Image: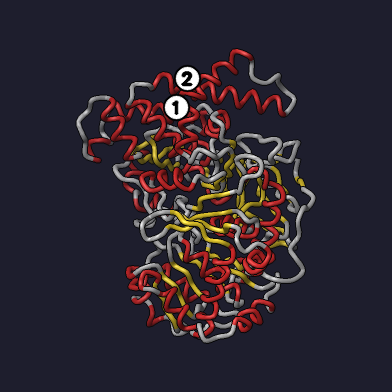
Amino acid sequence: MREFTNPPLASAPPVGGLADAVYDHAREDPLYVALGRKDEHGQWRDVTSAEFRDEVLALAKGLLAQGIRFGDRVAIMSRTRYEWTLFDYALWSIGAQVVPIYPTSSAEQVFWTLHDSQVSAAMVEHEDHAMTIATVIDRLPMMRRLWQLDAGAVQELYEAGAHLDDEVVHRHRRAVTPDSIATIIYTSGTTGRPKGCVITHGNFMFESDTAIERWEPLFHSKKGDQAATLLFLPLAHVFGRMVQVAAIRGRVKFGHQPQLNAAALLPDLAAFQPTFFLAVPYIFEKVFNAARRKAEREGKAGPFEKAVEVAVRYADAVEAKAWGIGPGPSAALRVQHQLFDKLVYSKIREAMGGRMKHAMSGGSAMDRRLGLFFAGAGVQIYEGYGLTETTAAATANPPERTRYGTVGQPFPGTTVHIADDGEIWLRGPNVFQGYLNDPKSTDAALHDGWLATGDLGSLDEDGYLTITGRKKEILVTSGGKSVSPAQLEERVRDHPLVAQCILVGNDRPYIAALVTLDGEAVEHWLQMHDKPKLTPAELVRDPDLETEVRRAVVAANTLVSQAESIRTFRILAHQFTEEHGLLTPSLKLKRKAIEKAYASEVEALYRA
């Protein structure tokens, strides 16, 4: 199949903007709980729709009092926290455009975003962010204001706008239309400078309203409960931003968690008890690997692996029955599944808050086996696919029939087309307006309403999309063999000791790999094998560890022909990091930068 369209369920409203939902909900049901927020003692407390409306309104008046006007661009540089959502809706209330910046951005990255988008003001989280902007402020003549959250910026703005009448804000708000620009989100830039994606209020409204109408039943743990989600995705990324907008519009209670490490995240999942959440595959991998390590420490590695196998087989049989190609789980498999549900699966669900039955995954590809495991363990993960340019998801697995290993069917109202060269093209009301100040890139990406994604994929007979790689990442060996690295890299990463894998081989005689290690997993592996603690340099030369990584490479090579296989690999002493310019803020590999940084290691892979 070359093209598939899903009929629309929702369309962008003919009038209004994103902030209207805050005021409408407060008027219709002022006491419903809109958000959860941690107090100064670290305890979660409820925020009603009326309370949130009042805070948004007070902040919007403060922004007006300090010179922010309709159409102005204001940057936000912060981790995911309550105040970001507050600022988003206050700025949208007065028709301003929000420019998000990753909190880990370097001074030059910050400069480029602020300069290219011509922001007039910025809100930062803390002093380090303020100092980062201070180093480039002399090159930003349009910057007039800088507020710092941890220095009392919110209260300062409340007080600044206290004398203004509410109607001043409402006059601005009523001037916002679906065609008004809501945000300019800069791509994370695996190659070249990031580009500013211009996204409208209408783009967000279509995307979130469609998601709510199509997937809303999955938001609940049981019929009649209030849907709740914990947002820990970065709000600087379009995925996190869409979750925020959908939660507000769909009346889903949500809280913010700024830290992705297990020590901070797991206690908040237990306390907040989300009914569902949205995450990248990395989070589900972390949950799975933590459960496996715990079982190994307790001497239960064998039973855990058996439980994994049963979960995968059970979910696989359920999937086959849903598609009419199998009878479903056998009686013996159901008995095994019930046993492991008490011993293993229930504990994994408890670690995720205890109420969650559904989750959505995006941002990168999820391994089919991992998705099957979680489904067998009682948490159904619906994988999707999208870009900043499509206001997050463009495809997702439908609630009725998930096809693991695919990213589902087009969002209702969206069309997926596979071009002759395998490139995925998308069309729909969620497609952005273009790149800011960059007509050349806009013309290259948009063709009569179609977005050329740069990703490669295929559609099956039911319209389910499978991602096979990226056009720019195709490796061509000196023998002329074209290899898409994504599938092989993901399979190597399936090994618990492997953190990252990147294939090399352009204009080389064969494909090779650079592999980095997961620190927590390696520490656990050393303990389980009674090995002394080793330095990074010693680790990469350990023959037993090399054997483990070789197993991962051999497993990956079963997916491809010999000409496409990984012939050799090198274990690196340190992971690729954003701080060293080797990862984007959304954790994608910067391939050219990695090959340049490890040029000598790459050369060594091809020495006779």
Between 477 and 426, the one nearer to me in the picture? 426
Quadrant that contains the C terminus: top left
Reading the image, the residue beneath label 2 is: 306
Q: Position of residue 517 (x, y in %)?
A: 35, 39
- In this view, 217 is above or below 438: above
Disc 2 crowd, CA 10 A, few/some/many (<14, 14-19, 20+): few
In the image, is 68 to the left or to the right of 418? Answer: left
> Which badge, 2 or 1, is on the more N-terminal residue?
2
Residue at 50% x, 22% y: name it: 340
Front one among 296 and 482: 296
**Residue 241 x, y percent position in the rendering:** 56, 59
Mark 1 lies on residue: 554
Q: Is residue 5 left or right of residue 349?
A: right
Left or right: residue 354 compared with residue 170:
left
Quadrant of the frame with the N terminus: top right
Number of marks: 2
Quarter of the image holding residue 296? top left
Vertical comparison of 169 with 252: above or below: below
Residue 571 disc label:
none
Rendered residue at 55%/46% (across/down): 277
Q: Nearer the viewer, residue 472 or 352?
A: 352
What amino acid is labelled 1 in the image? Val
Q: Residue at x 68, y 59 (%)?
A: 430
What is the crowding at mark 1: few (fewer than 14 residues within 10 Å), some, or many (at least 20)? some
315, above or below 442, in the image: above
Q: Disc 2 marks which amino acid?
A: Lys
The answer to whether residue 469 is seen in the rendering is: yes
What percent of the width, then of the height, locates residue 27? 66, 67
Mark 2 touches mark 1? (CB < 8 Å): no
